[in-house]
Amino acid sequence: MLRKLSSIKSKIVILYLILLVVTMVFAGYYLQHSLQNYFSQWMEQEVIKKMNLVTDVINPLLEEGDLTSLNEAVNNFGDKLETRFTIIDSEGVPLADSREEPQKMENHLQRPEVQMVLEEEIGRTERYSSTLDAEMRYIALPIIRDGEMIGIVRGAMELNDLKELFRGIWNVLLQAGVVVIIISTLLSLKMTEKITNPIERITSAAQKIANGFLDQKLVIRTKDEIGQLAEMFNHMVNRVKDKIDELSAEKNKIEAIVTSIADGVIAVNNQEEVILFNPAAEDIFGIKEQEVSGKSIIQITKNYKLDELIEKTLQQARVITEEVEILLPEKRIFRVQVAPIKDNQETKGVVAVLRDITEIRRLERMRRDFVSNVSHELKTPLTSIKGYVETLVDSKLDYETAQHFLGIINDETSRLERLITDLLDLSKIESVSNLGISQEVDLVEVIRDASSLLKNKAEEKEIDLKLSLPFEAPIIKGKQDQVSRLIINLLDNAIKYTPQGGKVKTVLYLEKDEIIIEVEDNGIGIPEQDLERIFERFYRVDKARTRKQGGTGLGLSIVKHIVRQYNGEIDVESKLEQGTKFIVSLPL
């Protein structure tokens, strides 16, 4: 309803009706005032004519002083002319009256109309008459004889009839006004439709365009301003459509580029509110683009370093590149390049590109550790061998001492041999592009053989080797020597780090479409901070103790690479001084 009242059509009709009503009220008031003056003057003239007639008749009676005849004549004229006449002497004493007995009437000398006559004017006044209980208009004229005023004749007419006449005029005007308003409303509605209908069509087309429907064309064949507006509207729509198509094509290109970029891309405005968040950035921070709109970078990333870089770029309007460590949702390292977005040399925002270098840094660290560990692992036995050899060459030792030195040299040489063998095996496993699967591997048989092979080593430490194997052996495709190496390394590792009198348990079972192998011991365990690094090459929880046990630091790394070649997974659970469990899952 409010919308209809606020429309142009309603405004035009209402304005037209207001003007019409105001015009009619003004015209009615003017007509009423004109008619009132006209009829007042007309009635006054009529009364004056009657008074002149009465004056001509009563002049002889006044001269004779016959008040009885005078009163009868006045009453007779009053009845016939339907007008009240009063005869007053020059002293204001009523001599005759057509409606009242003159003896009961008070002196009229101070009446306004009488005073006006005494001042040589026609007396005119309106007031309420208590005698007649009505609003009256009084007109007084002098009675002249021989150039002298001998009395005053006063005529009175009731205003009720005049008011009734005026009310009748207003009723006619109101009825005519209602008819005129109804007809005018219908005509104005019809006329305004010719103006508002094209505007409504233009508005409807504009709304559809605002909602994305650009295929709009107006057909308005008028030659006036509205027709010109429709023509320009069509031209504007065509231009807008071309521009939007052009912008959409560019936007699609940019979106395709930004979406396909593997690096995280974040754009913010000069208020530091996020305006772009590509899929790579969603993966980095674990949040959807719909959830970041209008939020600040600190609210989304919870990273003060990144927020500081963006704020610094906004202030300095230059490209800044730094490494940033992001802790949530996981710890990762990014090389962040932040560049300003400029418009006419004014910085409107910044765009930040986040490149994940976590793996690069990890590989660099692993490379450094590998080089350092290989160098250390090779240098230690070589230094020992060289020292003992130099001692044997330069000194004359007894047979037992020489044999002891040769035994140490043999142990160190064997250690070097194991280290080089493990390195070659690891290199061979990593370089194989496929398994070259050609045989079926019985895991139950492999586990039993590996357990038998390490039985003596376990008995030396009084370790109980337990097996929990199914009756039906799960069969996988692969290389038996690789699977055997996997089991032997896990069992050997468990035996090494299980104290005297401990136990090592190997379990094999099926779970859905996977074969699960668990090797569990009650040994020394692994600290929680070292769990994620135990599969790295040469990584040792306790280097001195591991070297004493004869390990090379490559066993678990070899295990992990074998499991990966079979598209499996390996996990570890451990608690200090309670034991460790390695869990290998291989797909059937």
Image (cartoon, rainbow, N blue to C red):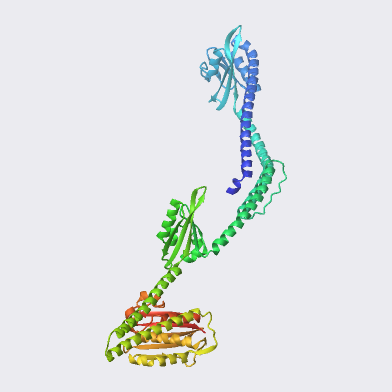
Quarter of the image for residue 69 reads: top right
**Residue 190 in view in this figure:** no
Q: Is residue 537 above or below residue 147?
A: below
User: Residue 248: x, y in percent?
Assistant: 61, 56
Residue found 65% across the figure and 14% down from its top? 57
Q: Is residue 511 above or below residue 113?
A: below
User: Residue 145: x, y in percent?
Assistant: 61, 8
Query: Which of the pair 406/163 is nearer the observer?
Result: 406
Query: Which of the pair 48/275 is nearer the observer?
Result: 275
- Most extreme residue toward the top is 146
Q: Relative to 175, is 271 on the left or the right? A: left
**Residue 537 in view in this figure:** yes
User: Residue 48: x, y in percent?
Assistant: 63, 18
| Count of numbered tags | 0
Q: Is residue 27 above or below residue 488?
A: above
Residue found 61% across the figure and 48% down from its top? 4
User: Residue 152: x, y in percent?
Assistant: 58, 14
Query: Which of the pair 534/242 is nearer the observer?
Result: 534
